[in-house]
Amino acid sequence: MNDLIATNRWGTFFGVSQKTLDTVWNNLTDPSGNSVVYISMEIGADRDVYHPIKKKLQDSDIDKTASNLLRHYAKLFLNGPEKIPNYSGGLGILAGDTLKSFADLKIPTLAISLLYRKGYFSQLVDSRLGQISTATDWSPENTPSLYLLKNPDFPDLPLEIEVPFFDDNDNEVLAIARLWMKMEVNEHLDFFVPEILLDYNIPSSPEWIRQVSQRLYDSISDQAKAVQRRLLGASVIPIQKAMGITANIFHLNEQHGVVVVLNMIGEWLSKHVGNDYHTKATDADILKAADAVAKHIVFTIHTPVKAGHDRFDKSIISGIGHAFCNRVLHLLAQDDENPNQYNFTALAMKVNRSTNSVSRLHKAVTQKQFPQFSKKITAITNGVHHLTWISEAKAAFYDSFSELKNWRDDPAVFSKAGLLFNSESFREAFELAWKQDTKILIDYINQMLSLHRKQMHETWIDPPNFLSNLDDGIQELSPDVYTIGFARRFSTYKRADLIFDDIDKLADIVISNNYPVNFIYAGKAHPSDEPGKSIIKLVLDIQEELYRKTNGMAKLVFIPGYDMKIAKMMVAGVHAWLNSPKRPLEASGTSGMKSAMNGIPNISTMDGWWVEGYHDGKTGWKFGYESDIDTACLSEAPSSLLYEQDSNSFYDIFPQILKSFYDAKSRSLYIDKCIHNLELNCPIFNTHRMAAEYVARYELKVPKAVQNRLEKLRKIYQSEN
Ligand SMILES: *Cc1c(COP(=O)(O)O)cnc(C)c1O
């Protein structure tokens, strides 16, 4: 226990030994530069879904000789707040899952993101108003595993970095940030990935900087968006210099942090052209610098949807960046469609050694969108961190079969689930674990419904669920009823309301087959995404009609405040996971992988990862129009979202899905699909395998033992095929 405290010049940290801290820091500051800086606008890694340090504390007693400091930390880690609301959805959670796998696999990495004192937003839902957003107040000060780094020269003061901004006349204004470090500690507590979260909301920063740095994806204005991007990207070199980080590879998780490329070009020019490069450098020099910088950049693009690609008016950029920036952007970030804008995606696309899309299908789509870069666009299919997303009940179930031994360290072990395919005891144990997970989810929902019912008269919020208006008892959901889950960001192309397009048809399927169904929905829409919010409202509005038309056999529930904890409960507790985006707009999607980790089949359109995870129907069901990518329409316009066609395709397969769950004779076919998910999907769609593929792109030199482990993971699956 006493080896859980470690100290270095940046502070005192809990949860790892001195040796581990020193190893991690030596790697990151080694002159060889064999490490990675991972840059992401958001990182989602809440502690209430994965917390190895807390687990260790719960498993062992604090001995009597422990110091007061150790006791203080132990208490904080056992009882402290566990939410770190630094994410909005898939992109951030992928970042968190990636860094957790990097820590497990001991890949030397420093992550950089911003710290948002008001989080993203907290979602309230009112049946009449739909989504209401409020600020998320949280305090990093007492959040376990977040540390304010010290200034080594003045240990009583925090470390600060300066990020320069320039007005239209190139007058410099400094944004100042303090550095919080969050530690992504691995399962064995013998390695970690530090994440530097920048807090610009401090007195020494200008007020306008403080304002725009508080909320993730603040879209109050385009200017605010551009400033946030700069606060991220332009911090990278100052952090490196302040902390002595020698990394040679910079991974851009989406283009948000691409300003780092401009800074690196500046650094190169100052070295090769001289300190007066602002006036001396020729266009050819700039292009040469870009070529040199490109060798250090790995870029992941996450969406074909245009709203995900940053473009800024030139006037905005000239009001925050140096005039020289404009020259570089003029050469490297022209937007072909809008001559008055710079296209940051174009810049990230141009200046890198490797552009990665997030699934095989997405690779084809990205190549179509950016034909000029077609050759260098590759695929690394996303994954999820299996240790985070496998429920407690499922983990205990996996632990109890020796064939799956070592699944925690090596998710490839799941391919051996095939050996157990015909084992009755395996199947029964699976169903038992599943029942526990379903009970947890349904109990949560029933408690929520009755709580909302009680609150009805106490608050001004009208309960989001129609069922809260019914008497206790009638309103309750049953865990024996077939339960379908749908939860993700509410965005038009994801078509959350698709299967309710023709309620009469859906109701008829339920009634005529006499199969009851629970539909469990959750998700947030960005506060300024009006169409997204209107789909939440639509889902709420459908509840009563669906209930009445099915005589109460179909219940549709919306869980407000979607976060990682609710996600984990849902992906493990439902009987099927529904995914209905319009192909090919979902680049990957990850929530379906989380359910696959728990052995739960997907019902999905052939989009994103599901093209790879479907295995000819062995692991779930497909529906919807399978557009050809060459002629596919990438528009989100309502008229091109194929509601009628794709909902009908769902209604075609739905009766057979219900039957295979309820009908005793076909029930074993349903369990077949579950086990096939373990066997075929768990070994592939995890972030360990994904990390191994990325490290190959980085061409990072790592110790032999690490290298061997990565090679083994890479052998299982190559996304590039
Ligand atoms: C996994 C997850 C997402 C992303 O889901 P997709 O299927 O990739 O859209 C979003 N929000 C939360 C809270 C999640 O856990």
Image: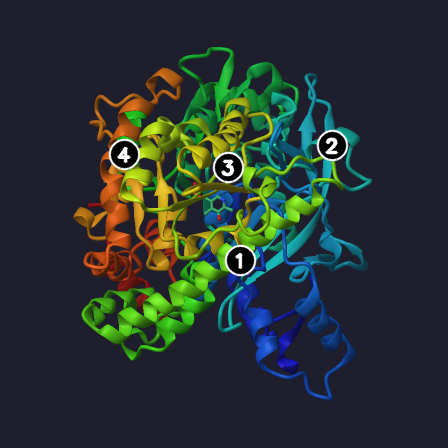
Measured Cα–Cα span from mark 4 to mark 1 = 29 Å
Q: Residue at x 73, y 45 (%)?
A: 137
Q: Viewer-proximal residue, 256 or 86?
A: 86
Q: Which residue is mark 4?
A: 651
**Which residue is found at the position 25% from the left and 41% from the top?**
655
Q: Secondary structure at mark 1?
A: helix
Q: Which mark is residue 211?
A: 2
- Left or right side of 454 for 619: left
Work out whether residue 522 or residue 152 is closer to the camera in this orientation and state it. Answer: 522
Q: Are marks 3 and 1 in contact (CB under 8 Å)?
A: no
Residue 443, numbered circle: 1
Dot 3: what SS? helix
Q: Amino acid at mark 1?
A: Asp
Q: Amino acid at mark 3?
A: Trp
Q: Secondary structure at mark 4?
A: helix
Tag count: 4
